Image: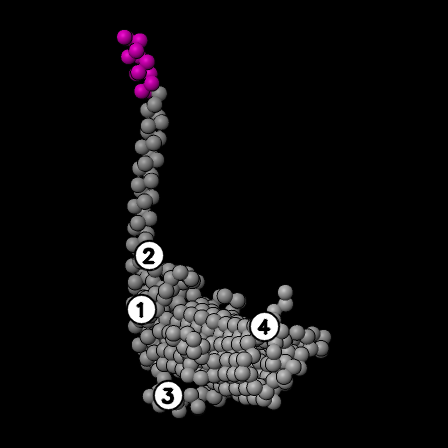
Amino acid sequence: METSRGNWGGLLMASLPGLAALLALLFTWMQVTQTNKELALSEQGQITNRFNAAISNLGSASLDIRLGGIYALGRIMNDSARDEPTVIQVLSAYLRQHAALPADGEKARVESSDENSSPRADIQAVMTVLGTRRHYDPDRSLPFDLSHTVLRGVQLAGDPDQIHFSGADLEGVDLSGASLHNVNLWRAWLPDANLSDAHLTGSRLDYAVLAGANLTGTDLTESRFYEADLTGADLTGTIFCTNLVVDEKVADAICADLIGVNLADANLTRANLDAVDLSDAKFCPDLTSPTPLGNGCARMAGASFRHANLKSAYLSGANLKGADLTGANLAGANLANADLKGAKIAGATFNGAKLTGVQGMPPSRATAPGPPS
């Protein structure tokens, strides 16, 4: 018995150093945890103070002080992901107040075609801050409401998939003459927007809504519009492709991607869509759909589709008088009751196309061969 007690005593004495070390570790952990909490509270307090100071600066009559407030909010947004939505709301409200579209918006759109127009420094600063934030999360919806604002001539450029305005509300916005390179406008809301003479190169507008938008003279080179809605848009003089020059020789064209785009009611009169990928595009309202988009077919008189990809495009009832379809791929396209009088179709492919009631096509081509076996 005495031996057993001695053993337990020895074991207890042997374990005391380990127990002491464990208690010391636990105490240290509690201290570190408490210190971290205090630091977090201190940081939040500092951010709150910085935020309040920046908001005060936004209301200043001095442009320099307002610019300081804008960039201070940008730093807060990049330092604190949790404050990002609040900063976006504040800066969006700033634009809606300080760059509001005039009541005579239509008049403003005509005047905005001046290529030399440039935004005020504070307007450009807000767009730069909003476009270069760090904490982008594709699964998080952020409150971008820049509707009915005048953002003429703003400039945003970055690496691909870097500048994010996905899902933004840009209804009625005036972005004429703007330079928006590599901007992400995925699912953006842009009905009746004015993008005339803007450079929208390399940007992503998949599933975006641009119904009724003014895209006259807009450079869309390398931009992507997968299943975007362009019903009723004005695309007169829009640039879809640019030729790549290598060693003073013209190489392949770099074009916009318009796969599955809806162009019903759009104005494509004399538009140049040579080599553009328009497969599965809709140029006319699909009357078989329960909710057809657009009141009528796109206006395409004199448009050029040389070597364009119109595979499976919906052109039923379309007016293609005088259009140039030389070398175009219309395999599987629906051209029922379309008017091709005076159209150039040399080298065009109609394999599997629906040509019932088509006008202006030579009898030898009116019955298109079926798809290759």
Disc marking residue 53: 1
Near mark 1 (Cα within 10 A), the count class, few <14, some 14-19 or many ≥20, is some
Q: CA distance from mark 1 to mark 3?
A: 34 Å
Q: Are marks 4 and 3 in contact (CB under 8 Å)?
A: no
Q: Earlier in the sequence, mark 1 or mark 3?
A: 1
Q: Are marks 1 and 4 in contact (CB under 8 Å)?
A: no
The type of residue carrying mark 1 is Ala
Q: CA distance from mark 2 to mark 3?
A: 44 Å
Q: Secondary structure at mark 3?
A: helix
Q: Secondary structure at mark 1?
A: helix
User: Residue 34: within the magenta?
Assistant: no
Q: Earlier in the sequence, mark 1 or mark 4?
A: 1
Q: Earlier in the sequence, mark 2 or mark 4?
A: 2
Q: Earlier in the sequence, mark 4 or mark 3?
A: 3
Q: Are marks 2 and 4 in contact (CB under 8 Å)?
A: no
Task: Please tell me whether mark 2 or mark 4 is closer to you in this view.
Answer: 4
Near mark 4 (Cα within 10 A), the count class, few <14, some 14-19 or many ≥20, is some
Q: Position of residue 213 (x, y in %)?
A: 44, 82
The type of residue carrying mark 2 is Glu
The residue carrying mark 4 is: 352
The type of residue carrying mark 4 is Gly
Q: Secondary structure at mark 4?
A: loop
The residue carrying mark 3 is: 105
Q: Taken as a whole, is the magenta stretch helix, strand or loop?
A: helix
Q: Earlier in the sequence, mark 2 or mark 3?
A: 2
The residue carrying mark 2 is: 43
Question: Does 100 appear above or below 183?
Answer: below
Q: Residue at x 39, y 71 (%)?
A: 168
